[in-house]
Image (cartoon, rainbow, N blue to C red):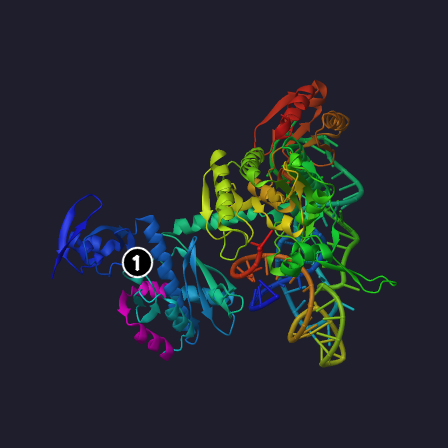
RNA sequence: GCUGCUGUAGCUCAGUGGUAGAGCACUCCCUUGGUAAGGGAGAGGUCGACAGUUCAAUCCUGUCCAGCAGCACCA
C-alpha cells in the first residue's frame, strides 16, 4: 500500500498509508482525541471521520470544541435522529430531506395525519432515548442501482427521486444511525452519543412543499433548534423572547399606533400616534427629496386597463392587481380599471405630457405613491407586508450616459437617509442579467458595469447576485441590518429601458432627433408601512425623539400642580414639541410606569417644589436617574433634541 | 394560494351541550401620593359569520371570513 503525507495545522507532517481515515489518524495521535473527534477538514473539505483519505492532504481534526463544525454536525445528526425517532413511532411515515439551518435544522415528512404539539413531545423523548443509546454512526458508499432498489423495496419514493437527482459523478453515501438508514452526503458524528441530549428542542411544525415547488405535494416540516449545551439553548430561547417583545404588531397595539381589521385585510388603520410617525417621516423624506433634486408629483389610484395593457402589467401582474369594474347604466360595456400596483406607468404619463428635451434630463420624479396589490393571503404580515401601502417611489428619466452618475448620486442620497434614521450597517447587492432577458449583451455589459462602478465610486462594495436581475435590466438592492441582526431589503435602484419603450417615452436630443430615455426605478425606504414596522422593531418602540409620536408627558404629582403642568405643556407645544399633560388622579409611580410602558421618551414630573421653583423633574425613557431643569432650559433643550436630523 | 393551528370583554386569556368568567384597561368614589401598578365599587360580551345536528349550540359538524407559524409568492 502506498504512503501519503498528511500535514497538520501546526505544520507537522506524518506519513500514513493511503486510504487511512481521519478516525484512525485521530486515534493514532491519542486515544482521547480518537474519542473526542467529530470530523476533520481535509484539503479544505469537511470530512467524515470514516471517509478514507487517498492522497497527500492537509488535515485538521475537529472536536466538539470547534464551534462551526460541531454545531453543524450536532444539528445534522439531530435531523437524522429525529427522522429515525419519527419512523420508529410511525413506521409508515415517508422520509425526505432534513438540512441544517440557522440555529437548528428541519426535516420534511410525508404522513397523512398532521403532527400535533403532543407528537413533538413524544418525538423529543424518543430522540433522547436514541441519543442515550449511543449508537455508532456508520457509512458506506453504495452502487446507485443498489440504493435505488433498496428505496423502492422499502417504499421511500422521495429518496428514489433524490437519488435520481444526485449528479452521476457523486458517490451515493448511505448512513446508519444504529439500524436506521438514510441517504446522506454527510459528514456525521461518530455516534449519536456525541449529541448533547439536553441542548435541543423541537419548536414547531408547518407545511412545506416537496422540493419547494408549489405544484408538488405538501409535506410536514418539523423544525428544531440545537446548540452545544443547555445554556446556549436557553440563551437562544431568551433571544427569541426578546425578539417577540419587538414585534411591531404588539408594540403597535401597546403604543396605540394603528390597527387592522378583517373588513380590510392587509390595510392599515393609522391611529393619531402612528400617523404622527408616518407624517413626520414623510415630511423628512419630502425635504430630503427636494434637496436631492427631485420634483414631486401625484398620480391617480384608479386607472383604466388600457394603460396596464400597454405597460405589460395586465399580462404579467394581473393576479396581483385589484380590478375595479364600473358598470354604468348607459354604457355599452363595463369599464375595467385597476388600482395601481406601481407608480411607474403613471410617471411615464407625466413625463410624456409635453415635449421633453435632453436639457430636461436627468428628470428625477418622486411620488409618495399609494399602491394596492392583491398579495396572497398567506403573505400578509402586520404592516410589513400589506395590500395597501405607500412607496417613497421615484423614477429618474435619463440618458444611458447618465446612469452611472445618477446611480452614484442615489447611493449617496440613500446613505444619508439611512444614517439619519439610525441604520449604519447596510449592504448592496447587484443583480445581473437573468437567463430570460431582453436587450443586447453589449447593453447589459454596459449597464451592469455602470451600477458596479457607481457603487465603487460612492465607496461601497457589493455582493453579486448573478442572474437575479429583472428581464429588462440589472438592479441594486440595499439591505440594512437592524439592532438584533436581522436583515431588511429596503432600497432599490433598477435600470429599465423597457417601460419607456412600451409607453413610448421620448425626448429631443441635442441632434434634434427623438430618443428613448432610460427609466431608473428607485426607492430608499420601500414602503412607509413596512419601514415604520422596521423602525418600531429596530428601536423596540423607543423611537428617536424626533419620530416619537408622544414626545413628552408632563405629569402632576399633586393636583395643586395641575395648572403649572398645563403651563409647561403650553410652553413645550409653542416650541413645536408634542407634549401632553397627565393630570389624572393617580400616583406619580403609576403615571411613570404607564408612560414608560407607552415608550414616551420624556416624562416631566411636577410637584409643589417644581411649581415654586418654576422647574421640572426630568425622567428620560430607560433611565432611572432623574434630573431637575428650569422651564426655559428644558424647552430649549428638548426643542434642540426633537429637531429632525436634517434640521439640526 | 397551500398545510397546520387559532378566533370568548378594549387587551391578555380561562371555561361549559342548559345563552359566560379572571386580571389589566375604562367610569365613579375614597385617597394628594415625589419617580415603573394605593384602595373600593360599577359598567362592559349576538363567545368571528352563516348553515346543520339537537328539546337546547359559545361548545358538536360543515362552509366561509380573519389572524398566527411555515411553505410558495414578492414582474
Q: Quadrant of residue B21?
A: bottom right
Q: Please, which residue is most extreme toward the right here?
A: A330
Q: Is A332 left or right of B25, judged from the image as shown?
A: right
Residue in view at x 71 percent, y 20 percent: A614
**Which chain contains the residue that carries disc 1?**
A
Q: Quadrant of the N terminus of chain A?
A: bottom left
Q: Is residue A595 visible?
A: no
Q: Is residue A495 visible?
A: yes
Q: Which residue is mark 1?
A: A194
Q: Local crowd at mark 1 within 10 Å, few (<14), some, or many (≥20)?
A: many
- Tell whether position A146 is magenta: yes
Q: Is A426 left or right of A61, judged from the image as shown?
A: right
Q: Quadrant of the C terminus of chain A?
A: top right
Provide residue A364's location: percent of width, then percent of height. 65, 38
Q: Which residues are magenta?
A: A128-153
Provide residue A260's location: percent of width, then percent of height. 69, 52
Q: Nearer the viewer, residue A26 or B53?
A: A26
Q: Is A11 left or right of A222, judged from the image as shown?
A: left
Q: Quadrant of residue A167?
A: bottom left
- Tell whether position A347 is magenta: no
Provide residue A73's location: percent of width, then percent of height. 34, 56
Amino acid at each position: 500500500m502506498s504512503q501519503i503525507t498528511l500535514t497538520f495545522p501546526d505544520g507537522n507532517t506524518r506519513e500514513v498509508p493511503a486510504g487511512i481515515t481521519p478516525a484512525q489518524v485521530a486515534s493514532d495521535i491519542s486515544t482521547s482525541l480518537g474519542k473526542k473527534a467529530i470530523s476533520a477538514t481535509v484539503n479544505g473539505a469537511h470530512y467524515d471521520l470514516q471517509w478514507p483519505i487517498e492522497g497527500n492532504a492537509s488535515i485538521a481534526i475537529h472536536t466538539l470544541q470547534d464551534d462551526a463544525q460541531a454545531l453543524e454536525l450536532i444539528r445534522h445528526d439531530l435531523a437524522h435522529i429525529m427522522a429515525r425517532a419519527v419512523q420508529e413511532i410511525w413506521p409508515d411515515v415517508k422520509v425526505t430531506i432534513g438540512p441544517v439551518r440557522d440555529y437548528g435544522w428541519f426535516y420534511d415528512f410525508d404522513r397523512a395525519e398532521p403532527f400535533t404539539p403532543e407528537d413533538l413531545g413524544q418525538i423529543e423523548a424518543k430522540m433522547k432515548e436514541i441519543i442515550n443509546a449511543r449508537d455508532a454512526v456508520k457509512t458506506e458508499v453504495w452502487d446507485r442501482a443498489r440504493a435505488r432498489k433498496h428505496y423502492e423495496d422499502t417504499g421511500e419514493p422521495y429518496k428514489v427521486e433524490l437519488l435520481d437527482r444526485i449528479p452521476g459523478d457523486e458517490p451515493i453515501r448511505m448512513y446508519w444511525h444504529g439500524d436506521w438508514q438514510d441517504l446522506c452526503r454527510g459528514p456525521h458524528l461518530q455516534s449519536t452519543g456525541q449529541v448533547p441530549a439536553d441542548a435541543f428542542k423541537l419548536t414547531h411544525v408547518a407545511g412545506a412543499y416537496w422540493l419547494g415547488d408549489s405544484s408538488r405535494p405538501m409535506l410536514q416540516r418539523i423544525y428544531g433548534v440545537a446548540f452545544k449545551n443547555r445554556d446556549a439553548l436557553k440563551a437562544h430561547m431568551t433571544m427569541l423572547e426578546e425578539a417577540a417583545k419587538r414585534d411591531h404588531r404588539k408594540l403597535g397595539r401597546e403604543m396605540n399606533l394603528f390597527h387592522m381589521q378583517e373588513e380590510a385585510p392587509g390595510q392599515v388603520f393609522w391611529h393619531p400616534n402612528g400617523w404622527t410617525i408616518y407624517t413626520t417621516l414623510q415630511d423628512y423624506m419630502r425635504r430630503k427629496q427636494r434637496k436631492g433634486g427631485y420634483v414631486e408629483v401625484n398620480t391617480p389610484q384608479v386607472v383604466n386597463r388600457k394603460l396596464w395593457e400597454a405597460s405589460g402589467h395586465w399580462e404579467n401582474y394581473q393576479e396581483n392587481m385589484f380590478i375595479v369594474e364600473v358598470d354604468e347604466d348607459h354604457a355599452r360595456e363595463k369599464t375595467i380599471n385597476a388600482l395601481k400596483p406601481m407608480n411607474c406607468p403613471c410617471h411615464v404619463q407625466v413625463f410624456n405630457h409635453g415635449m421633453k428635451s435632453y436639457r430636461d434630463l436627468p428628470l428625477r420624479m418622486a411620488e409618495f405613491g399609494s399602491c394596492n396589490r392583491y398579495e396572497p393571503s398567506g403573505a400578509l404580515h402586520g404592516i410589513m407586508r400589506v395590500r395597501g401601502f405607500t412607496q417613497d417611489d421615484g423614477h429618474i428619466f435619463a440618458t444611458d450616459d447618465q446612469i452611472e452618475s445618477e446611480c452614484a448620486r442615489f447611493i449617496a442620497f440613500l446613505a444619508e437617509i439611512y444614517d439619519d434614521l439610525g441604520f449604519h450597517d447596510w449592504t448592496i447587492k447587484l443583480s445581473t442579467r437573468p437567463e430570460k432577458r431582453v436587450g443586447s449583451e453589449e447593453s447589459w455589459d454596459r449597464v451592469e458595469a455602470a451600477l458596479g462602478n457607481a457603487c465603487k465610486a460612492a465607496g461601497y462594495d457589493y455582493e453579486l447576485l448573478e442572474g437575479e436581475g429583472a428581464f429588462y435590466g440589472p438592479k441594486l438592492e440595499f439591505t440594512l441590518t437592524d439592532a438584533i441582526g436581522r436583515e431588511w431589503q429596503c432600497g432599490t435602484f433598477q435600470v429599465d429601458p423597457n417601460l419607456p419603450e412600451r409607453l413610448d417615452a421620448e425626448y429631443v436630443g441635442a441632434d434634434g432627433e427623438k430618443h428613448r430615455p432610460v427609466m431608473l426605478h428607485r426607492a430608499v425606504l420601500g414602503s412607509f408601512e413596512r419601514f415604520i414596522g422596521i423602525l418600531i422593531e429596530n428601536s423596540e418602540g423607543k423611537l428617536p425623539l424626533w419620530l416619537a409620536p408622544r414626545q413628552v408627558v408632563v405629569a402632576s404629582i399633586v393636583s395643586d400642580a395641575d395648572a403649572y403642568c398645563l403651563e409647561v405643556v403650553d410652553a413645550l407645544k409653542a416650541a413645536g414639541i408634542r407634549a401632553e399633560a397627565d393630570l389624572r388622579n393617580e400616583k406619580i409611580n403609576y403615571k411613570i410606569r404607564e408612560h414608560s410602558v407607552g415608550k414616551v421618551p420624556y416624562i416631566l414630573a411636577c410637584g409643589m417644589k417644581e411649581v415654586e421653583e418654576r422647574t421640572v423633574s426630568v425622567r428620560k425613557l430607560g433611565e432611572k436617574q432623574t434630573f431637575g431643569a428650569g422651564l426655559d432650559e428644558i424647552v430649549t433643550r428638548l426643542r434642540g433634541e426633537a429637531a429632525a436630523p436634517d434640521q439640526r
